[in-house]
Image: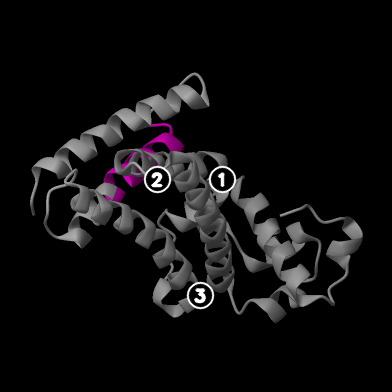
């Protein structure tokens, strides 16, 4: 999203613009603390709007967090689609590309990642829009794993379990990188090589495991 000018932030009439402004304000605060530290009043102040204006768009902090996560997954899906287009038709390349894209998105968008992938305590079932965009991204990984089974690269078996296993490993590495438990590489390319090496182990494991 493009940054808003002070005049735009002050203009509270256009609902869509104000909603985006509040989301961006929340992201700026997230850069300084954890999701649990956010309050709707703080977000309104960071966005340059009144507290009352914020409540006209979001019932409470959780609804704002859900909106932020939904926007994050929308952007993440764009990352995924671009990655798949670049990787070409080879299943192994598509799988590696999706795995690295998950990590890269989180490293480049830590504010979004903390809400989308971290433990906010948010009951996502209350927010159908968020559930829909999250499921859309998950289906891409499941689709590539299914392609791998069809091509004989991945052993036949329970597709949902294999998808969860692949996601859990890449997600775990992502959070370790974000938390500094795994030091990043000297460059983004070096980090990509390190992450891709782990993803190769995932591929080997799924090729050998039929259930």
Is residue 135 found left or right of 201 in the rendered image? right
For the point 37% across and 43% down, the residue is 94
Q: Residues within 10 Å of mark 1 (few under 14, many from 20)?
A: some
Is tag 1's residue or tag 2's residue first in the polypeptide sequence? 2
Q: Which residues are magenta?
A: 167-181
Image: 166 above or below 11: above
Residue at x 38%, y 45% (from the top left corner): 89
Say which element carries label 3.
helix
Kindly identify which residue carries mark 3: 129
Q: Nearer the viewer, residue 13 or 54?
A: 13
Label 3, residues with CA under 10 Å away: few <14, some 14-19, many ≥20: some
Q: Secondary structure at mark 2?
A: helix
List the residue tagged with mark 2.
Answer: 98
Taking the image as shown, residue 12 lies to the left or right of residue 170, namely right
Question: Which element is circle 1 on?
Answer: loop
- Disc 3 vs disc 2: Cβ atoms closer than 8 Å? no
* Outermost right residue: 7
In the picture of the structure, the residue carrying the numbered disc 1 is 109
Residue 110 percent location from the top left of the image = 54, 45
Q: Nearer the viewer, residue 13 or 121?
A: 13
In terms of sequence position, does the residue under pointer 3 or pointer 2 come before the other? 2
Residue 198: quadrant of the picture = top left
Residue 127 makes an appearance in the image? no
How many angstroms separate mark 1 from mark 2 (CA)?
16 Å
Would you place residue 56 above or below residue 44 in this image?
below
Quadrant, the C terminus: bottom left
């Amino acid at each position: 999203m493009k940054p808003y000018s002070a005049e735009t932030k002050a203009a509270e009439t256009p609902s869509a613009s104000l909603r985006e402004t509040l989301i961006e304000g929340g992201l700026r605060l997230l850069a300084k603390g954890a999701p649990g530290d956010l309050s709707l009043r703080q977000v309104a102040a960071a966005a340059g709007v009144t507290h009352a204006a914020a409540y006209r768009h979001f019932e409470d902090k959780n609804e704002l967090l859900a909106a932020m996560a939904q926007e994050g997954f929308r952007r993440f899906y764009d990352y995924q689609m671009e990655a798949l287009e670049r990787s070409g038709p080879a299943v192994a390349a598509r799988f590696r590309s999706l795995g690295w894209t998950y990590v890269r998105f989180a490293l480049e968008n830590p504010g979004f990642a903390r809400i989308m992938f971290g433990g906010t305590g948010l009951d996502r079932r209350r927010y159908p829009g968020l559930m829909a965009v999250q499921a859309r991204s998950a289906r891409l990984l499941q689709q590539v794993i299914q392609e791998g089974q069809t091509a004989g690269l991945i052993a036949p078996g329970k597709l949902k379990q294999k998808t969860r296993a692949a996601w859990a490993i890449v997600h775990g590495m992502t959070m370790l990188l974000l938390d500094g438990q795994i030091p990043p590489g000297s460059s983004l390319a070096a980090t990509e090589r390190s992450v891709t090496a782990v993803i190769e182990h995932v591929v080997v494991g799924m090729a050998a495991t039929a259930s």
